[in-house]
Amino acid sequence: MKRSTGRLTTAVTGTALLLGSLCAPASAHAHDDGARILVFSKTAGFRHDSIPAGIAAVRELGGRSGFAVDATEDARAFTPANLRRYRAVVFLSTTGEVLDARQQKAFEQYIHHGGGYVGIHAAADTEYDWTFYGGLVGAWFKSHPAIQPARVNVEDRAHPATSHLPGTWNRTDEWYDYRSDPREKVHVLASLDESSYTGATMNGDHPIAWCQSYQGGRSFYTGGGHTEESYADPAFRAHLLGGIRYATGAAQADCRPENGYRPLFDGAAASLDGWKQAGPGTFLLDDDGTLSSTGGMGLLWYAASGFSSYSLKLDWRMAGDDNSGVFVGFPPSDDPWSAVDNGYEIQIDATDVPEKTTGSVYGFQSADLARRDRALNPPGEWNTYEIRVEGEHLRVFLNGVRINDFTNTDPARSLTDGHIGIQNHGPDDQVSFRNIRIRELPAAHAPRGH
């Protein structure tokens, strides 16, 4: 059931539906078939009682999602020939010095050639004298207080490891403090609210799960997973599955560091105060902070201000073969056709002709389709756009991959000052949006010619 709030609507979703989505078995993905991962759980220090439960959980996730799982505590598995068999290696609560110099070199080569890494909990309490590993895991363990409940703030709700979670995730675990704050080097997926528990020492900025591209490979780390109960928790298991799928390359995500952005829409109804609906149709606001298109053709545009030099990021998802787009560089108007005629649309519709397909500057320039196809998640999964405007130069990034590079030469469509908006294309098109944010760039940094 949905209730109206002005031109927008809030959908009330029951707790049973939320729990059902978290508890449902992960569907098999064709692009996961044939993948194999290695779970490595050697310990040279403290040994977690939860390791067997963690191995069992990863095996079950693999069985449901189409990837095979090998588990070992034998470091002799770290040879170039053997590691080539695996899409990702999971360090499951490893501790201490677990690899010798030759094994370390083999693992470094594996990552350099595109291998994936997943670190769980005490993986951050491992190999303190190996600089490469410290960069790969993102931060080393420092200390922890007693096991207790805490609030986890989910910062990225498009990444496959966190897209299923609410904005605030309440759970009990052993909460690590780290020797350094990794935020400047990694993409933070979730952080701890230090006011929600006792004993934290990271001065308010406390990442607890993150991802990154690292020296040719992919890295995902979560600080959760100390307790056996974690591996029976559907939400945590889905968190692990999403991290594994990212590390193996089965799911795409923007894992570049993200700092300095401010929200234009953060999921709360109040954050829509600066927005206006132009034309027919509207967007529905669900109680999980998702805007979904209905009716049209219309445009929800940010009327509070225009922008001239900026990086705009937003997360979007199609239900099927649907149509929408993100408009930039248009003058204020309650007529959606003004944006069409005076601005540029970054298209969302993967099945249209090249100059009108996902990632294209609609009607003007196709995306690099090979790069687009490699970066694109399929219907039902979230994607992230970055649309970067500097002067008359417009670049489009899909899940962190640049797929379009366009320079405007039409004075009537100047990008140097204009508004942004999201399209509700028509009654048969269902496209959802989350987490619209912007970072304004100094005009002096705008390129002068290309």
Image: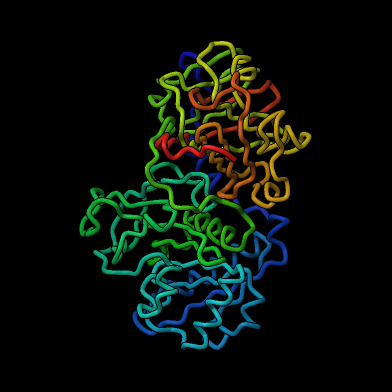
Q: Nearer the viewer, residue 114 or 5?
A: 114
Residue 345: x and y in percent read 62, 28
Q: Is residue 445 above or below residue 228?
A: above
Q: Quadrant of residue 198?
A: bottom left
Q: Is residue 97 above or below residue 371?
A: below
Residue 23 at least partly seen: no
Which of the image's four quarters has the N terminus?
top right
Residue 133: x and y in percent read 44, 74
Identify the residue at horizontal 61%, vertical 34% (top origin): 407
Q: Quadrant of residue 28?
A: bottom right
Which of the image's four quarters has the C terminus?
top right
Identify the residue at horizontal 54%, vertical 27% (top origin): 415
Residue 142: x and y in percent read 28, 69
Question: How many numbered badges does the structure rendering display?
Answer: 0
Q: Is residue 225 left or right of 215 when viewed as pictured?
A: left
Q: Is residue 153 above or below residue 70?
A: above
Q: Is residue 402 left or right of 125 when viewed as pictured?
A: right
Residue furthest front in the image = 449
Identify the residue at horizontal 32%, vertical 59% (top origin): 181
